[in-house]
Structures are given as structure tokens and as C-alpha cells.
Amino acid sequence: MNSTTSSDLIDSVKGSPNQRLFGFGIFGLCLLIAAIYVGVQLNHDLTIIPSGTATSYFLLATALLIALGFEFVNGFHDTANAVATVIYTRSLPASFAVVWSGGWNFVGVMVSSGAVAFAVLQLLPIDLVLNVGSGVGFAMVFALLIAAIIWNLGTWSLGLPSSSSHTLIGSIIGVGLMNQLMHGGAASSSVDWSQAWNVGKSLLVSPVVGFVFAALLLYALKLLVRVPALYAEPKGEQPPPFWIRSILILTCTGVSFAHGSNDGQKGMGLIMLILIGTVPAAYALNRTVTPSETQTFISVAHHASEVLGHYTTGATPVASPRDEIEHYINSHQVTPTTLVAVRQLTDTIGSQAGQSPSLSDVPQTQVNNVRNNMYLTSEALRLMAKTKQPAFAPADQAVLDNYHTLLDRSTKFIPTWVKVAVAIALGLGTMVGWRRIVRTVGERIGKQHLTYAQGASAELVAAITIGAADRFGLPVSTTHVLSSGVAGAMVANGSGLQWSTVRSLLLAWVLTLPVSIALAAGLFWAFRHVF
């Protein structure tokens, strides 16, 4: 181990007072502009709808602060990992690195598709999603967010790069389990376990991918690139050679962008639930859908109803289509009445949409009902396409896929100001909490300090892994992927691992799910007695 003390190594990367002032000045200006934009857009959205009650606005403000607080704490853990190697190797001063990373996080958040956000929401019990504006909905949101924040702050205080993704997933499961217990074991009140398993697989496999491929990449570099400077540890305040510095900055940029496009979405989905629950008239339906697009949607809905009619000839209408579809979503078992219910709800949606020039003109009293009808139908069509049950003819499946896309366009959207708000929170978290995580990643995983090649290998693999997960709408942990990548690079280099740190990391990772499940379940039970 290098004789330079840990404190000296970290303190030397702060940068000069002028550099810090410049970095913080740029960030502060961007923060001010973004905050003004968010405030103006939110105010605009609230002024074009009938005035709400003081209670609804109080709940909106409180829930938004807690949701953004989660993203702020997420910045401690995950975004700090993105800048760990570039700061530790002296490639950039910390004050500039966090601004640079925050900027690329912002870009990643802004170009994100929203697929990860809604994949996480699909874990929630269907009855909580449909009743998000009720007391049980607020209990759900507050419980899962506060539980995630408590665990993240606890692990951060110990300098352990625990996963915000695992924490949030555990919190959702905890809320779902307690909700089911409080409803006598009703299936509609439970977590979607098939979706939970899909998410769980991506969270479990991604660290293994990080470890293995970072090790292989470092092996390949040592065979092909025989430049001793690339495999050296940082020395004092001296930055690495320019070409090495460029590689490290590039990999930091990739991880920051990928983190914003994946992790940033988790908070966005929850914020949308909050907005839908508190001010449904503004956010339950996508108000940017134009009158012409609305007419196209109505036409496609009628066509989809005709297609479904081919498979329901002579079937008797069901008494409650929504209950039948909820049962299908929870059981994943198609019954003879499932398609009948989907067709009936499709006809209802077409009729409801046809009563107004556009979705933005749907009466306030009907907005929630229309959204819930659309959401249930969309989820049913998603499951049918995924399981290929029932088996539709290719031409019919194409019609239903188009209908499904338009349903999602109407209900699964994220306003630009929400993305900006999440990016601000992530950036602020990174500014405050980077030091602890940088020290752990740079010094405490391996028995030797992190070298330039090890840092570049871990970050390049992390950026590609997270980017691929975002492409398929799968939530992964930046923390786990990057930390595992650093460990893999250490092993490949023969540096050895500090098993005390590795044990602490593994313990934090193992405990994250059960602790967050227990915390969220307890908080949900308590909040149900408040709301």
C-alpha cells in the first residue's frame, strides 16, 4: 500500500480555491436557471386547471420534496461512483469533476425514455397504482421513499457504496407485502412477483457482469497496451499523462450519462405517481396529445376492438371488465372472459375519448376514470404480448401493439420539468457526498491504490452495462456495477482485495433488501393510520 495517507490523497483533489469557485459558480448558475424553469412550468400546469384544496397542495409539496430528497441521497451513492475514479486519479479537480458529471447526468436524464421508470412502477400492487390519489396511495409513496432515504443515509455515513436501486425495490416489495397483509392476502394488493423477478435478475446479474468484464478488459489491456504509466498509481497531486487523463474523463462521462439515463428514471416514475395522485387534472392524462392525435387514437381503439371481436364471437359481456382485467394482471392466467373484458374496456375508452376534442379537454371528474381504464388495458395488452397468450394472428398483433403504444403515450409520460428537477437533485447530492465514496472506491476495495487502467476498465464496463440495461428498460445499480468492476480489476491486476471492506460491502448489499422491506412495511402500516 502506498505510504501517502488517505486524507492527503483525498484532500489533494479538491482543486485550487479559484477552481472550486469556478466549479461551484457554474453549478450554482445552472441550478438557479433550472429551479426557475421547474417553478415556472409547475405553476403553469397548476394554473390551467381548477384550483385545488390547500391540503392537496401541501401533500403535493411534501411528497415532491421527499421524492427529490431520495434522488439527492441517490447522488451520494450512485453519482459519486461516476466521479470516483476521475477524482481519485487526479484527472480532474473534484469541484470541476462533480459539475462535469452533473452535466452529463442531466443530459442522460433528459434523453431517457422513461422505460425504466415505468418498469419499476409495474412492481407496485395494481390497486395502489389505481388508487394513488387516496390515503393508501399517499401512505405508499411516503413509506417507500422514506424507507429508501433512511437506509441510503445509513450506508453512506459508513462510506459503503450501497445500492439505491436495491433499496427502492426492497421498499416497494415491503409496501406490497404489508398492503397484502392488511387486505387479508388479496392478490390485487400484492407485488407483481413476475416483474419483481425480472428486475431482481438484472440487479443480481449486473454486478457479476461488472466484475468479470472489468477483469477481462484489464487482462486485454495488459497484453495489448504495454505502457507502464497506464498501470501506475496516482502520485501526489500530479495528474496522469494527457492521453490517460482523456480516457478517464471519457469513461467518467459515459458512466455519468448512463447513470442519469437509468437511475434518474426511478425517481421520475414516483414523482409522476405523486402528481397523478394530487393533481390528476393536470397529470393523469398527457395534455400534449393534440386533437388530431386524439382522433387517431379513437380510430385505432375502434380497430383494436374489432380485432378483439374476432376472438370473442358469441361471448357474454362481463359484469365488471375492470375487475376481470385486474384479476388477469395479478394471476397472469387468461380466461375465456379476459378478452371480452379487454374489448369492453376498449370500447369504453374510445367512447370516453370521443366525448372531448382532445385528452386535455377530458372533464376533471372523469380524468382518473379514463386514466385507470387506459392503464389497465395497457397492462393487459403488455402481458398478452409478453406471454403470447392468447396467440393472435401477426396482423392482429400489430394492430394491438399500435393500440398499446398509443395507450402508453396517453398515460406513461414524464414532463420535461420533472426530468430537470431530478437532475438538480442528483447533482446536489454528488456535490455534498462524493468524498466518502471516492475514498472507498479508490483505496478500500483493493490492497493497493486504484491505478489508471483499473479505473478506466471499471468505468468503461459500467457505462456499457448500464447503457444496455437502459436500452431494455431494466433498472440496475451503478454502485454495484462499478464497485464490482473495481474489484474485478484489482483481482486481474493481482492487487488483492481488502476483505474487511469487501465483507462490509457484501453485508450492506445482502442486508439492503430485507432491511428496506422491513422499514417500508412498518412505515406503510404506520402511515395507513394517518391517511
Image (spheres, rainbow, N blue to C red):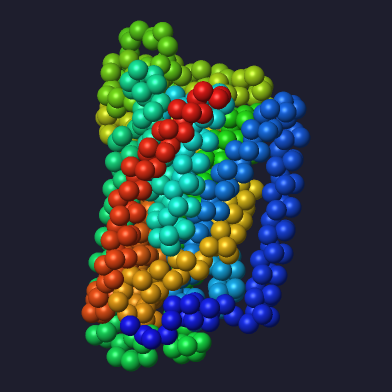
Coordinates of residue 319 in the picture (x, y in percent): 41, 8
- Image location (x, y in percent) of residue 23: 65, 73
Looking at the rendering, which quadrant does residue 491 occupy?
Answer: bottom left
In this figure, what is the number of numbered marks? 0
Q: Please tell me which residue is depicted at 58% across the width and 43% down the height of the picture.
A: 66
Residue 95 lies, with reference to residue 362, above or below; the image says below
Image position of 16 with respect to 140: above or below: below
On the rendered image, what quadrant is the N terminus found in? bottom left
Query: Relative to residue 496, is residue 350 drawn left or right?
Result: right
Q: Would you place residue 129 above or below residue 114 in this image? A: above
Residue shown at the point (30%, 50%) measured from the top left: 510
- Residue 241, given in percent of the width and then of the height, sits at 46, 90
Question: Which of 389 and 28 lies nearest the eye of the viewer?
Answer: 28
Q: Is residue 287 above or below residue 233?
A: above
Q: Is residue 480 left or right of residue 72?
A: left
Quadrant containing the C terminus in the rendered view: top right
